[in-house]
Image (tube, rainbow, N blue to C red):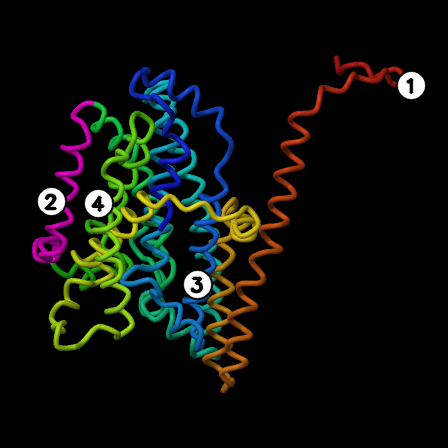
């Protein structure tokens, strides 16, 4: 994942240690937008769309670079950008201005989640008897539809594929408090507490204390363990906010960090694709690679990729980055569109006996449809930006007298 180094390159300024945070932030605001950040989000969106549609290609793209997927990168990059953008607002304008930026954004993501989810589950409710794949996908909802509908606005019922945005909403909504606590007690305390919560999730302490509440409520909290994945989010926010104030990796540590991270990355790739000798790898280790609880070795593999790219600092050409960056600039809208497309494509594939070629074509069509949607959004945003920059038009005197006001 390139996100760690990209955030670093965007904000770390020369001789920043000699300047105060305020001056450093003012200078960072003048730096141009880094296309690599948008390109990374675009790559993650393409990977998600390809994996979510069951085709022969989806299996090959499932964690191609080791024990990491698009979800880890998407959540971590979003957290880095949150720490970067809102941390800068916090430094410049205070907690109130920062929170007044975060919470409306959180509300908008919450609205998008419900606006996409509710029509789809209602369609599934109506046509579940005729369309078996829809009935299977929304099985938990169809068992208790009225109770599930009541819990969906509370983010307590999340059908498959509809659990990433609720995760984002909860974490982003809590980010102002995370930044405030870190400002007062430093990131070391925040990361320690977050790490302990992650460790509790690994030991299943939350399940032991809470128990199975689905026995009396149609709860479905999604596949991602909320207490485990918060550690990845907090680490990303800490990385983005810290990069505002000082370099993340000193130059004298780059070679050592790259060497250590490369070894871990290589082992992860070889093991993921079965190229590691089985005698050197016990199957019990896979219990530490669980995706939904963000297992320890999985987290280590992701940290190694981040560390490697921090030390490496790749600079792909703008031509390579332009296409995925188009999706990344409108990541929320593109992600929202990909959900109904994936549901429709999966339903068609499972209902009809399609060949592997036909399945692959459908999967590629889902990805292709994301680009005209992003291009239309990009065109509208550029036109709105040009309109906002244009000088105010001089009012033209009407050729006829205005109507008198009432009364």
What secondary structure is found at the residue carrying circle 4?
helix
Q: Earlier in the sequence, mark 4 or mark 1?
A: 4
Identify the residue at horizontal 30%, vertical 16% (top origin).
18
Quarter of the image with the C terminus in it: top right
Q: Classify 388 as above or below 105.
A: above
290 lies left or right of 324: left
In front of the other: 277 or 394: 277
Give the crowd class for mark 2: few <14, some 14-19, many >=20 residues within 10 Å. some
Mark number, residue 399 = 1
Q: Earlier in the sequence, mark 3 or mark 2?
A: 3
Q: Are marks 1 and 3 in contact (CB under 8 Å)?
A: no
Q: Nearer the viewer, mark 4 or mark 3?
A: 4
In front of the other: 143 or 199: 199
**Which residue position holds label 4?**
256
Q: Quadrant of residue 48?
A: bottom left
Q: How much space separates mark 2 and mark 4, taking CA atoms?
A: 28 Å
**Which residue position holds label 2?**
196
Identify the residue at horizontal 72%, vertical 19% (top origin).
392
Q: Quadrant of residue 310?
A: top left
Q: Position of residue 1 (x, y in %)?
A: 35, 51
């Amino acid at each position: 994942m390139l996100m760690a180094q990209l955030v670093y390159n965007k904000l770390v300024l020369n001789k920043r240690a000699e300047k105060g945070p305020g001056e450093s932030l003012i200078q960072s605001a003048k730096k141009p937008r880094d296309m690599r950040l948008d390109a990374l989000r675009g790559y993650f969106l393409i990977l998600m769309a390809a994996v979510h549609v069951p085709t022969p290609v989806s299996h090959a793209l499932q964690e191609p670079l080791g024990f990491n997927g698009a979800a880890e990168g998407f959540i971590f990059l979003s957290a880095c950008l949150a720490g970067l953008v809102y941390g800068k607002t916090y430094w410049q304008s205070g907690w109130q201005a920062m929170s007044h930026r975060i919470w409306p954004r959180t509300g908008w993501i919450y609205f998008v989640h419900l606006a996409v989810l509710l029509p789809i589950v209602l369609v599934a409710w109506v046509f579940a008897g005729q369309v078996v794949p829809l009935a299977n996908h929304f099985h938990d909802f169809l068992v208790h539809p009225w109770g599930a509908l009541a819990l969906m606005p509370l983010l307590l019922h999340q059908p498959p594929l509809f659990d990433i945005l609720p995760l984002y909403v909860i974490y982003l909504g809590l980010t102002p408090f995370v930044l405030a606590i870190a400002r007062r007690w430093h990131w070391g305390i925040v990361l320690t507490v977050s790490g302990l919560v992650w460790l509790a999730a690994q030991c299943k302490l939350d399940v032991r204390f809470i128990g199975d509440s689905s026995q009396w409520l149609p709860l479905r909290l999604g596949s991602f363990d909320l207490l485990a994945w918060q550690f990845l989010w907090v680490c990303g926010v800490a990385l983005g906010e810290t990069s505002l104030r000082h370099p993340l990796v000193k130059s004298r540590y780059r070679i050592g960090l790259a060497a250590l991270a490369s070894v871990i990355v290589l082992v992860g790739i070889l093991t993921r694709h079965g190229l590691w000798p089985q005698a050197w790898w016990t199957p019990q280790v896979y219990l530490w690679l669980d995706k939904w609880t963000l297992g320890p070795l999985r987290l280590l593999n992701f940290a190694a990729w981040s560390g490697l790219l921090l030390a490496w600092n790749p600079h792909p050409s703008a031509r390579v980055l332009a296409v995925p960056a188009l999706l990344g600039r409108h990541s929320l809208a593109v992600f929202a569109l990909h959900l109904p497309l994936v549901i429709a494509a999966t339903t068609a594939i499972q209902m009809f006996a399609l060949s592997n070629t036909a399945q692959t074509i459908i999967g590629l069509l889902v990805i292709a449809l994301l680009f005209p949607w992003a291009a239309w959004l990009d065109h509208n945003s550029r036109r709105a930006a040009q309109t906002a920059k244009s000088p105010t038009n001089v009012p033209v005197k009407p050729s006829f007298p205005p109507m008198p006001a009432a009364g």
